[in-house]
């Protein structure tokens, strides 16, 4: 339903691969909003892989500082920037996380993450 509300599902079915990604995004992160932080999203985020030990330490410390509460108001979907759109934006008290969901598809030409390969 979240994907439909945000206009992510074409009524003609022309964007099937995108629909799968958007539906996956909504199913995983939409439902996790209703779970306490330590039971829902924290176990998933705790498994993130980093290229830098410093970045990983900052990230894990930020997760540990998050209160164990429901995070519904901290999750935003398909946030548009000046030149791009991020699938999920998590705005915690001590950490902001942007997530791009991919399901059997490469990064688009507009995505520059593959060039930077940096995770903060």
Image: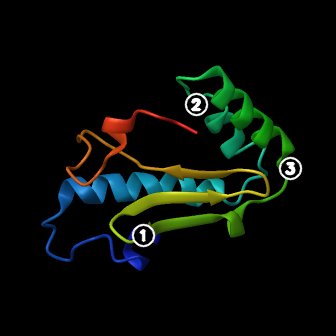
CA–CA distance in space, label 1 to label 2 = 24 Å
The residue that label 1 is drawn on is 81
CA–CA distance in space, label 3 to label 2 = 19 Å
CA–CA distance in space, label 3 to label 1 = 29 Å
Q: Which mark is residue 39?
A: none
Up the image or down, 41 lies above or below 96; here it is: above
Q: Are marks 1 and 2 in contact (CB under 8 Å)?
A: no
Q: Nearer the viewer, mark 3 or mark 1?
A: 1
The residue that label 3 is drawn on is 68
Q: Secondary structure at mark 1?
A: loop
Residue found 18% across the figure and 63% down from its top: 15
Q: Secondary structure at mark 3?
A: loop
* Relative side of 50 to 80, left or right: right
Q: Is residue 21 in sight in this rendering? A: yes
Where, by quadrant of the figure, is residue 60 drawn?
top right
Where, by quadrant of the figure, is residue 33 drawn?
bottom right
Q: Secondary structure at mark 2?
A: loop
Q: Nearer the viewer, residue 103 or 109?
A: 109
Looking at marks 3 and 2 on the same chain, the residue that comes earlier in the sequence is marked by 2
Residue found 67% across the figure and 32% down from its top: 46
Q: Nearer the viewer, residue 77 or 109?
A: 109
Q: Which mark is residue 48?
A: 2
Residue 42 image offset from top left, x and y in percent: 71, 40
Please, which colouring scheme is shown? Answer: rainbow
Residue 37 image offset from top left, x and y in percent: 77, 49
Residue found 73% across the figure and 57% down from its top: 92
Looking at marks 1 and 2 on the same chain, the residue that comes earlier in the sequence is marked by 2
Residue 76 image offset from top left, x and y in percent: 57, 67
Label 2 crowd bin: few (<14), some (14–19), many (20+), radius 10 Å:
few
Up the image or down, 85 lies above or below 116; here it is: below
């Amino acid at each position: 339903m979240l994907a439909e509300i945000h206009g992510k599902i074409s009524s003609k079915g022309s964007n099937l691969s995108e629909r799968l990604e958007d539906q996956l995004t909504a199913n995983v992160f939409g439902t996790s909003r209703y779970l306490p932080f330590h039971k829902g999203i924290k176990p998933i985020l705790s498994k993130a892989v980093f290229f830098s030990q410093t970045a990983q330490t900052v990230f894990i410390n930020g997760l540990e500082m998050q209160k164990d509460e429901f995070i519904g108001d901290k999750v935003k979907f398909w946030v548009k920037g000046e030149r791009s759109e991020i699938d999920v934006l998590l705005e915690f008290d001590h950490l902001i996380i942007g997530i791009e969901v991919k399901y059997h598809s490469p990064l688009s030409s507009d995505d520059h993450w593959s060039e930077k390969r940096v995770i903060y």
